[in-house]
Amino acid sequence: MKPHIGLIDYGMGNLHSVQRAFLRLGQTLKIVKKPTDIDKCNALVLPGVGSFDPAMDHLKQTKLIPHIINWANEDRPLLGICLGLQLLFESSDEGTSKGLGILKGNIEHLPENQNERIPNMGWSLLKSQSDCPIFKNHHLNNWVYFVHSYAAIPSERKNLAATIKFGSHEITAIVWEKNIGACQFHPEKSGTAGQMMLDRWLKWLVNNDKLKE
């Protein structure tokens, strides 16, 4: 069964590059701008670029927030990208708005005085922390592309799937809980490595029991 994937459009996402990346894998995405657009979708992608508070404000205007939360509560497949990862958490030091609260934890500013540039912009090597459907640690080409100044601090260690080195710190790169996953980096801009991860997500979806309901 080929998945029907909705791409959430709240005015702050890199929609075109995400769409192109999936099209290269033979997968079309349905744009989701309002609650009724979710009908017939069996997986969602939540992208995002920009700041936390404006993103939550834009999401509120779509009236999609309770539907996204309900989607997650039903343990249906969702993939967050970049700011889309951060929005899944409870709060962010970048602003005062509450996040979606789908994942427990907070978004914090990247650590200072690490001889690292902030924002963290460029390629970093992923390091596995726990099992994850989209990331295979034995592949040599796990360099992916980041643009961010904040990173997630999951309350539950088991939700941390992959990290990158930032100075003397390990910072969150992938989070995963049941059928909810997200990348702080941009898989759609990460060349072969990112394309392989999106392909693994699609293949994982096909075999997902929630997709077959």
Image (cartoon, grey):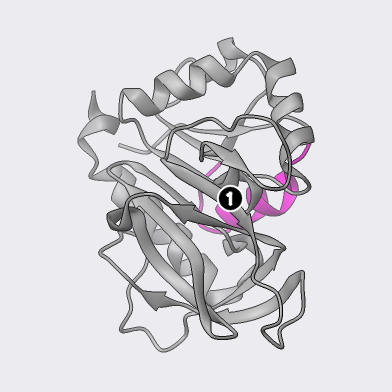
Q: Is residue 211 visible?
A: yes
Q: Is residue 131 above or below residue 50?
A: below
Q: Which amino acid type is marked by label 1?
A: Ile
* Total residue callouts: 1
Residue at (58% x, 46% y) in the render: 86
Task: Residue 164: give x, y in percent of width and height.
Answer: 50, 76
Judge from the rendering whether residue 75 lies leftward or rightward of residue 107; answer left or right. Answer: left
Q: In the image shown, does 153 or 198 lie closer to the viewer?
A: 153
Q: Is residue 125 above or below residue 133?
A: below
The image quarter containing residue 114 is bottom right
Residue 203 is covered by the magenta coloring: no
Task: Residue 77: give x, y in percent of width and height.
Answer: 37, 37
Task: Residue 129: give x, y in percent of width and height.
Answer: 32, 70
Q: Residue furthest top?
A: 36
In what element is the residue under mark 1?
A: strand
- Label 1 belongs to which residue? 107
Judge from the rendering whether residue 208 lies leftward or rightward of residue 81; answer left or right. Answer: left
Q: Which class describes the residues within 10 Å of circle 1: few (<14), some (14-19), or many (20+)? A: many
Residue 24 is covered by the magenta coloring: yes
Residue at (50% x, 65% y) in the render: 173
Q: In the image shown, does 188 or 87 lie closer to the viewer?
A: 87
Quarter of the image for the N terminus: give it.
top left
Range of magenta residues: 12-28
Residue at (53% x, 55% y) in the render: 152
Judge from the rendering whether residue 50 lies leftward or rightward of residue 131; answer left or right. Answer: right
Q: Is residue 81 visible?
A: no
Task: Residue 189: give x, y in percent of width and height.
Answer: 66, 66
Quarter of the image for the C terminus: give it.
top left
Residue at (78% x, 48% y) in the render: 50
Q: Is residue 109 above or below residue 205?
A: below
